[in-house]
Image (cartoon, rainbow, N blue to C red):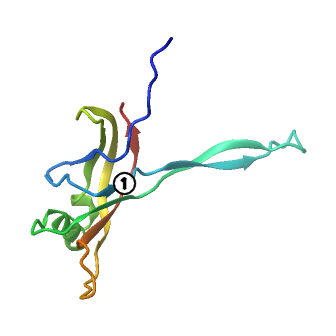
C-alpha cells in the first residue's frame, strides 16, 4: 500500500523580504494569476472562433499583522509616496512551513511594492489587537517548490 500524502495546513508560514526583516504576520494572501482569453476568427473559417492567450494579470498580496513600534512596513509604504515605486520594488517570498518547521512550499514574487497601508481604527469599546494591513502589487509570481 502506498504512503498517504496529506495536504499541508495553512497556519504556519513565513514572509521574506529583500532588506526588511519583518516576517511575523497573522494573515497573508497568495496572489492569483489569470490569463485573459482572446477570441480570434480566421477569415477562412466563418463559423468557429479560436481562443488565444492574452494579457496575464496578477492579484495583489495582502499582509496583516499586529501593530508594534516597528516602522519598517510603514516606512516602505512611505518611500513609495515620497519617491515612487521604482526605488521601492523588492522580491518577496511566501513560504509554507509544516508542523516540524520545515519549508515545504515557496512562492517568489518579483518587483513588489506597497500600494496601500491601512491601520485599524481606534475603538474605546473594544479590546482587539490593532492590525495594520499592507496591500502589495507585483509583476509576477512563481511557485518554486
| Image position, residue 26 (x, y; %) | 28, 58
Foreground residue, 110 or 84? Answer: 110
Farthest residue in the left direction?
69
Farthest residue in the top direction?
1
| Image position, residue 116 (x, y; %) | 32, 70
User: What residue is drawn where x is 14% and y is 63%?
Assistant: 72
User: What residue is drawn where x is 20% and y is 71%?
Assistant: 78
SS category of the residue bearing label 1: loop
The number of discs equals 1
Relative to 89, say whether 76 is above or below: below
- Quadrant the C terminus occupies: top left
User: What residue is drawn where x is 32% and y is 57%?
Assistant: 27
Sort mark 1 into few (<14), some (14-19) or many (20+) by Cα contacts within 10 Å: many
Farthest residue in the right direction?
47
The answer to whether 35 appears left or right of 37 in the picture is left
Instruction: Quadrant for residue 75, please give it.
Output: bottom left
Foreground residue, 46 or 16? Answer: 16
User: What residue is drawn where x is 87% and y is 40%?
Assistant: 45
The answer to whether 45 appears left or right of 127 in the picture is right
| Image position, residue 44 (x, y; %) | 87, 39
User: What residue sits right under mark 1 in the picture?
Assistant: 138
| Image position, residue 73 (x, y; %) | 19, 63
Foreground residue, 15 or 44? Answer: 15
Amino acid at each position: 500500500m502506498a504512503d498517504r500524502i496529506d495536504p499541508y495546513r495553512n497556519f504556519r508560514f513565513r514572509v521574506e523580504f529583500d532588506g526588511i526583516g519583518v516576517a511575523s504576520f497573522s494573515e497573508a494572501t497568495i496572489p492569483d494569476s489569470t490569463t485573459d482569453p482572446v477570441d480570434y476568427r480566421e477569415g477562412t473559417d466563418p463559423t468557429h472562433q479560436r481562443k488565444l492567450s492574452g494579457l496575464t494579470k496578477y492579484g495583489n498580496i495582502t499582509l496583516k499583522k499586529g501593530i508594534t513600534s516597528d516602522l519598517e512596513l510603514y516606512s516602505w509604504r512611505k518611500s513609495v509616496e515620497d519617491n515612487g515605486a521604482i526605488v521601492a520594488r523588492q522580491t518577496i517570498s511566501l513560504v509554507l512551513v509544516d508542523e516540524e518547521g520545515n519549508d515545504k512550499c515557496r512562492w517568489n514574487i518579483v518587483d513588489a511594492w506597497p500600494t496601500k497601508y491601512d491601520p485599524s481604527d481606534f475603538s474605546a469599546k473594544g479590546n482587539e489587537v490593532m492590525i495594520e494591513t499592507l496591500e502589495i502589487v507585483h509583476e509576477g509570481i512563481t511557485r518554486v517548490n
